[in-house]
Amino acid sequence: MKKYNLFIKALTLLLILAVSFSFCSCAAQKKTIVKKPKASQEEKEPPKELEDMKKSIEKIEKTLQSLHESSKKPLILLQQEVQEKEKKEGGDKEKEKKEEEGNNTGGEDKKKSDQPPTAEEVRLKMEQELFKTMEDTKKDVMELHSTWNTYEPKAVADLAMQTSITSFEEALNNLTKSINDREVFPSLVNANQAYKNLPDFYMLYKAKTPPEIDRVRYAVKQIKLSSEVKDFATVNDAMSYLDNIWIITKPKLKKNNIEVMNQFEFALADLKAAVESQNVMVITAKADVILKIADEMEKAAEKQSD
Protein backbone atom coordinates (compact mmCIF):
# COMPACT_ATOMS: atom_id res chain seq x y z
CA MET A 1 0.00 0.00 0.00
CA LYS A 2 2.87 2.33 0.89
CA LYS A 3 4.50 1.57 -2.46
CA TYR A 4 1.28 2.37 -4.20
CA ASN A 5 0.97 5.72 -2.40
CA LEU A 6 4.56 6.58 -3.26
CA PHE A 7 3.87 5.74 -6.89
CA ILE A 8 0.82 8.03 -6.94
CA LYS A 9 2.76 10.90 -5.37
CA ALA A 10 5.63 10.47 -7.83
CA LEU A 11 3.23 10.41 -10.79
CA THR A 12 1.44 13.53 -9.53
CA LEU A 13 4.75 15.34 -9.11
CA LEU A 14 5.77 14.45 -12.66
CA LEU A 15 2.46 15.69 -14.02
CA ILE A 16 2.81 18.98 -12.13
CA LEU A 17 6.34 19.46 -13.45
CA ALA A 18 5.23 18.61 -17.01
CA VAL A 19 2.32 21.09 -16.90
CA SER A 20 4.56 23.80 -15.37
CA PHE A 21 7.20 23.27 -18.06
CA SER A 22 4.57 23.39 -20.78
CA PHE A 23 3.10 26.62 -19.40
CA CYS A 24 6.51 28.31 -19.15
CA SER A 25 7.37 27.25 -22.68
CA CYS A 26 4.12 28.69 -24.05
CA ALA A 27 4.59 31.90 -22.11
CA ALA A 28 8.13 32.24 -23.39
CA GLN A 29 6.97 31.50 -26.91
CA LYS A 30 4.25 34.14 -26.67
CA LYS A 31 6.80 36.69 -25.49
CA THR A 32 9.19 35.99 -28.36
CA ILE A 33 6.53 35.99 -31.12
CA VAL A 34 6.53 39.35 -32.92
CA LYS A 35 3.58 39.77 -35.19
CA LYS A 36 4.33 41.56 -38.38
CA PRO A 37 2.00 44.56 -38.60
CA LYS A 38 -0.28 44.74 -41.57
CA ALA A 39 0.50 47.47 -44.04
CA SER A 40 -1.78 50.35 -43.18
CA GLN A 41 -3.65 52.06 -46.00
CA GLU A 42 -2.63 55.38 -44.50
CA GLU A 43 1.05 54.57 -45.11
CA LYS A 44 0.53 54.92 -48.87
CA GLU A 45 1.34 58.20 -50.56
CA PRO A 46 -1.57 59.92 -52.34
CA PRO A 47 -1.68 58.77 -56.00
CA LYS A 48 -0.49 61.21 -58.65
CA GLU A 49 -3.99 61.31 -60.14
CA LEU A 50 -5.41 62.65 -56.88
CA GLU A 51 -2.76 65.36 -56.72
CA ASP A 52 -3.48 66.25 -60.37
CA MET A 53 -7.20 66.45 -59.65
CA LYS A 54 -6.61 68.95 -56.85
CA LYS A 55 -4.35 71.13 -59.04
CA SER A 56 -6.87 71.00 -61.87
CA ILE A 57 -9.78 72.10 -59.67
CA GLU A 58 -7.70 74.90 -58.17
CA LYS A 59 -6.75 76.10 -61.67
CA ILE A 60 -10.39 76.05 -62.79
CA GLU A 61 -11.47 77.94 -59.66
CA LYS A 62 -8.79 80.59 -60.18
CA THR A 63 -9.88 81.17 -63.79
CA LEU A 64 -13.56 81.35 -62.88
CA GLN A 65 -12.87 83.68 -59.96
CA SER A 66 -11.02 86.07 -62.29
CA LEU A 67 -13.99 86.10 -64.68
CA HIS A 68 -16.39 86.62 -61.80
CA GLU A 69 -14.41 89.56 -60.41
CA SER A 70 -14.28 91.17 -63.88
CA SER A 71 -18.05 90.90 -64.21
CA LYS A 72 -18.50 92.98 -61.03
CA LYS A 73 -16.32 95.88 -62.16
CA PRO A 74 -17.97 99.19 -63.14
CA LEU A 75 -18.13 100.09 -66.84
CA ILE A 76 -15.66 102.96 -66.62
CA LEU A 77 -13.02 100.71 -65.08
CA LEU A 78 -13.61 98.06 -67.73
CA GLN A 79 -13.27 100.72 -70.43
CA GLN A 80 -9.91 101.76 -69.03
CA GLU A 81 -8.69 98.16 -68.80
CA VAL A 82 -9.79 97.35 -72.36
CA GLN A 83 -8.14 100.53 -73.62
CA GLU A 84 -4.86 99.78 -71.85
CA LYS A 85 -4.89 96.18 -73.07
CA GLU A 86 -5.52 97.23 -76.65
CA LYS A 87 -2.73 99.79 -76.45
CA LYS A 88 -0.33 97.19 -75.16
CA GLU A 89 -1.31 94.59 -77.75
CA GLY A 90 -1.36 97.07 -80.61
CA GLY A 91 1.81 98.94 -79.70
CA ASP A 92 4.16 96.87 -81.79
CA LYS A 93 1.77 96.67 -84.74
CA GLU A 94 1.24 100.43 -84.70
CA LYS A 95 5.00 100.98 -84.64
CA GLU A 96 5.49 98.71 -87.64
CA LYS A 97 2.67 100.44 -89.51
CA LYS A 98 4.18 103.88 -88.89
CA GLU A 99 7.53 102.73 -90.17
CA GLU A 100 5.93 101.41 -93.36
CA GLU A 101 3.56 104.32 -94.08
CA GLY A 102 5.63 107.19 -92.65
CA ASN A 103 4.94 109.59 -89.83
CA ASN A 104 2.08 111.45 -91.61
CA THR A 105 -0.60 108.97 -90.48
CA GLY A 106 0.61 108.70 -86.91
CA GLY A 107 -1.38 111.63 -85.57
CA GLU A 108 -4.73 110.22 -86.62
CA ASP A 109 -3.96 106.76 -85.21
CA LYS A 110 -2.78 108.27 -81.91
CA LYS A 111 -5.94 110.33 -81.59
CA LYS A 112 -8.06 107.24 -82.17
CA SER A 113 -6.14 105.14 -79.61
CA ASP A 114 -6.50 107.83 -76.93
CA GLN A 115 -10.29 107.56 -77.03
CA PRO A 116 -11.81 105.03 -74.58
CA PRO A 117 -13.91 102.24 -76.11
CA THR A 118 -17.67 102.63 -76.06
CA ALA A 119 -19.92 100.60 -73.78
CA GLU A 120 -20.91 98.40 -76.71
CA GLU A 121 -17.28 97.79 -77.63
CA VAL A 122 -16.51 96.82 -74.03
CA ARG A 123 -19.50 94.49 -73.94
CA LEU A 124 -18.40 92.75 -77.15
CA LYS A 125 -14.83 92.51 -75.87
CA MET A 126 -15.98 90.96 -72.59
CA GLU A 127 -18.17 88.45 -74.40
CA GLN A 128 -15.27 87.43 -76.63
CA GLU A 129 -12.98 86.96 -73.64
CA LEU A 130 -15.68 85.04 -71.75
CA PHE A 131 -16.21 82.70 -74.70
CA LYS A 132 -12.49 82.06 -75.17
CA THR A 133 -11.78 81.57 -71.47
CA MET A 134 -14.73 79.24 -70.93
CA GLU A 135 -13.72 77.18 -73.97
CA ASP A 136 -10.22 76.82 -72.52
CA THR A 137 -11.70 75.94 -69.14
CA LYS A 138 -13.92 73.34 -70.80
CA LYS A 139 -10.74 71.56 -71.93
CA ASP A 140 -9.46 71.62 -68.34
CA VAL A 141 -12.74 70.07 -67.16
CA MET A 142 -12.51 67.33 -69.79
CA GLU A 143 -8.99 66.60 -68.60
CA LEU A 144 -10.31 66.45 -65.04
CA HIS A 145 -12.85 63.84 -66.18
CA SER A 146 -10.03 61.79 -67.67
CA THR A 147 -7.94 61.99 -64.51
CA TRP A 148 -10.92 61.02 -62.36
CA ASN A 149 -11.65 58.00 -64.56
CA THR A 150 -8.07 56.85 -63.98
CA TYR A 151 -8.20 57.43 -60.23
CA GLU A 152 -11.70 56.08 -59.52
CA PRO A 153 -10.71 52.35 -59.62
CA LYS A 154 -7.86 53.15 -57.23
CA ALA A 155 -10.25 54.97 -54.92
CA VAL A 156 -12.52 51.92 -54.85
CA ALA A 157 -9.56 49.59 -54.24
CA ASP A 158 -8.37 51.86 -51.42
CA LEU A 159 -11.79 51.61 -49.76
CA ALA A 160 -13.12 55.09 -50.49
CA MET A 161 -16.70 55.60 -49.36
CA GLN A 162 -19.26 55.23 -52.12
CA THR A 163 -20.98 58.40 -50.93
CA SER A 164 -17.76 60.37 -51.56
CA ILE A 165 -17.39 58.89 -55.04
CA THR A 166 -21.02 59.61 -55.94
CA SER A 167 -20.86 63.13 -54.52
CA PHE A 168 -17.69 63.97 -56.45
CA GLU A 169 -19.12 62.63 -59.72
CA GLU A 170 -22.30 64.65 -59.23
CA ALA A 171 -20.32 67.84 -58.60
CA LEU A 172 -18.09 67.16 -61.61
CA ASN A 173 -21.09 66.60 -63.87
CA ASN A 174 -22.73 69.80 -62.61
CA LEU A 175 -19.47 71.69 -63.21
CA THR A 176 -19.27 70.33 -66.75
CA LYS A 177 -22.81 71.48 -67.53
CA SER A 178 -22.39 74.98 -66.09
CA ILE A 179 -19.06 75.45 -67.89
CA ASN A 180 -20.64 74.31 -71.15
CA ASP A 181 -23.44 76.85 -70.59
CA ARG A 182 -20.78 79.52 -69.84
CA GLU A 183 -22.31 80.26 -66.42
CA VAL A 184 -19.48 81.65 -64.33
CA PHE A 185 -20.97 81.91 -60.83
CA PRO A 186 -22.73 78.49 -60.84
CA SER A 187 -19.47 77.00 -62.15
CA LEU A 188 -17.62 78.47 -59.18
CA VAL A 189 -20.13 76.89 -56.79
CA ASN A 190 -19.89 73.51 -58.55
CA ALA A 191 -16.09 73.61 -58.58
CA ASN A 192 -16.09 74.25 -54.84
CA GLN A 193 -18.45 71.31 -54.32
CA ALA A 194 -16.01 69.08 -56.23
CA TYR A 195 -13.19 70.43 -54.04
CA LYS A 196 -15.20 69.52 -50.93
CA ASN A 197 -14.86 65.80 -51.69
CA LEU A 198 -11.08 65.74 -52.16
CA PRO A 199 -10.28 65.46 -48.41
CA ASP A 200 -12.39 62.28 -48.27
CA PHE A 201 -9.92 60.69 -50.69
CA TYR A 202 -6.81 62.17 -49.06
CA MET A 203 -7.90 60.61 -45.75
CA LEU A 204 -7.12 57.21 -47.30
CA TYR A 205 -3.41 57.98 -47.56
CA LYS A 206 -0.42 59.38 -45.75
CA ALA A 207 -0.96 63.03 -46.61
CA LYS A 208 1.75 65.63 -45.94
CA THR A 209 -0.80 68.01 -44.49
CA PRO A 210 -4.06 67.42 -42.61
CA PRO A 211 -6.83 67.03 -45.23
CA GLU A 212 -9.06 69.05 -42.93
CA ILE A 213 -7.28 72.21 -44.10
CA ASP A 214 -8.95 71.68 -47.48
CA ARG A 215 -12.28 71.29 -45.70
CA VAL A 216 -11.61 74.67 -44.09
CA ARG A 217 -10.99 76.15 -47.53
CA TYR A 218 -14.20 74.66 -48.89
CA ALA A 219 -16.29 76.06 -46.03
CA VAL A 220 -14.80 79.56 -46.28
CA LYS A 221 -15.30 79.69 -50.05
CA GLN A 222 -18.87 78.48 -49.61
CA ILE A 223 -19.50 81.27 -47.11
CA LYS A 224 -18.15 83.83 -49.59
CA LEU A 225 -20.16 82.57 -52.53
CA SER A 226 -23.43 82.14 -50.66
CA SER A 227 -23.16 85.57 -49.04
CA GLU A 228 -22.84 87.20 -52.47
CA VAL A 229 -26.32 85.98 -53.39
CA LYS A 230 -27.53 86.67 -49.84
CA ASP A 231 -28.27 83.01 -49.16
CA PHE A 232 -27.61 83.37 -45.45
CA ALA A 233 -29.22 80.04 -44.58
CA THR A 234 -26.42 78.31 -46.51
CA VAL A 235 -23.90 80.77 -45.06
CA ASN A 236 -24.91 79.79 -41.52
CA ASP A 237 -24.71 76.08 -42.36
CA ALA A 238 -21.23 76.54 -43.81
CA MET A 239 -20.21 78.54 -40.74
CA SER A 240 -21.31 75.69 -38.45
CA TYR A 241 -19.43 73.24 -40.66
CA LEU A 242 -16.32 75.42 -40.42
CA ASP A 243 -16.56 75.53 -36.61
CA ASN A 244 -16.77 71.74 -36.39
CA ILE A 245 -13.91 71.21 -38.86
CA TRP A 246 -11.64 73.58 -36.94
CA ILE A 247 -12.26 71.59 -33.74
CA ILE A 248 -11.03 68.48 -35.59
CA THR A 249 -8.16 70.26 -37.37
CA LYS A 250 -6.62 72.06 -34.42
CA PRO A 251 -5.27 68.97 -32.57
CA LYS A 252 -3.63 67.74 -35.77
CA LEU A 253 -1.43 70.82 -36.07
CA LYS A 254 1.93 71.00 -34.34
CA LYS A 255 2.27 73.07 -31.18
CA ASN A 256 5.01 75.18 -32.73
CA ASN A 257 2.35 76.48 -35.13
CA ILE A 258 0.74 78.23 -32.20
CA GLU A 259 1.17 81.70 -33.74
CA VAL A 260 -0.65 80.91 -36.98
CA MET A 261 -3.27 78.95 -35.03
CA ASN A 262 -3.94 81.99 -32.88
CA GLN A 263 -4.26 84.10 -36.01
CA PHE A 264 -6.83 81.65 -37.31
CA GLU A 265 -8.80 81.79 -34.04
CA PHE A 266 -9.05 85.60 -34.20
CA ALA A 267 -9.88 85.57 -37.93
CA LEU A 268 -12.57 82.95 -37.32
CA ALA A 269 -14.15 85.10 -34.61
CA ASP A 270 -14.12 88.08 -36.97
CA LEU A 271 -15.77 86.03 -39.72
CA LYS A 272 -18.48 84.87 -37.30
CA ALA A 273 -19.23 88.46 -36.38
CA ALA A 274 -19.40 89.44 -40.06
CA VAL A 275 -21.78 86.56 -40.78
CA GLU A 276 -24.01 87.60 -37.89
CA SER A 277 -24.14 91.16 -39.26
CA GLN A 278 -24.78 89.81 -42.80
CA ASN A 279 -22.36 92.40 -44.20
CA VAL A 280 -21.28 90.92 -47.53
CA MET A 281 -18.21 93.12 -48.01
CA VAL A 282 -16.89 92.38 -44.54
CA ILE A 283 -17.64 88.65 -44.93
CA THR A 284 -15.62 88.61 -48.16
CA ALA A 285 -12.70 90.46 -46.55
CA LYS A 286 -12.61 88.22 -43.45
CA ALA A 287 -13.00 85.07 -45.56
CA ASP A 288 -10.01 86.07 -47.70
CA VAL A 289 -7.93 86.53 -44.53
CA ILE A 290 -8.77 83.00 -43.38
CA LEU A 291 -7.88 81.55 -46.78
CA LYS A 292 -4.44 83.16 -46.55
CA ILE A 293 -3.94 81.80 -43.03
CA ALA A 294 -4.97 78.33 -44.27
CA ASP A 295 -2.19 78.59 -46.87
CA GLU A 296 0.29 79.45 -44.11
CA MET A 297 -0.87 76.49 -42.00
CA GLU A 298 -0.43 74.16 -44.95
CA LYS A 299 3.09 75.42 -45.69
CA ALA A 300 4.09 75.01 -42.04
CA ALA A 301 2.67 71.47 -41.95
CA GLU A 302 4.56 70.55 -45.14
CA LYS A 303 7.87 71.71 -43.64
CA GLN A 304 7.31 69.62 -40.52
CA SER A 305 6.47 66.50 -42.54
CA ASP A 306 9.74 66.66 -44.54
Image (cartoon, rainbow, N blue to C red):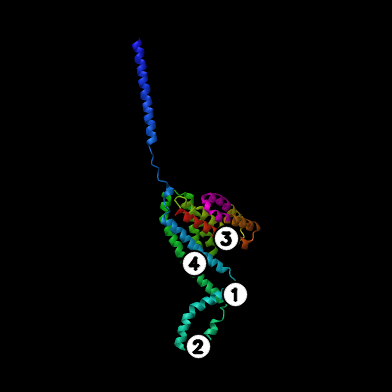
Image coordinates of residue 18 in percent, x first then y, are: 35, 24
Residue indicated by mark 4: 134
Reading the image, the residue beneath label 3 is 289
Residue 265, image quadrant: bottom right
Looking at the rendered structure, the secondary structure element under dot 1 is helix
Residue farthest top in this picture: 1
Q: In this view, does 151 lie above or below 12?
A: below
Residue 149 in the image, given as x and y percentages of width and height: 42, 56
10 Å crowding of disc 3: few (<14), some (14-19), many (20+):
some
- Dot 4: few (<14), some (14–19), or many (≥20) neighbours within 10 Å? many
Placement of 247 over or under 95, stated as above or below: above
User: Label 1 amino acid?
Assistant: Ile
Q: What amino acid type should be assigned to the residue bearing mark 3? A: Val
Q: How far apart are marks 4 and 1 (CA)?
A: 24 Å
Residue on which the image places disc 2: 105
Query: Label 4 to label 3, Cα distance in Å?
Result: 28 Å
For label 1, the residue is: 76
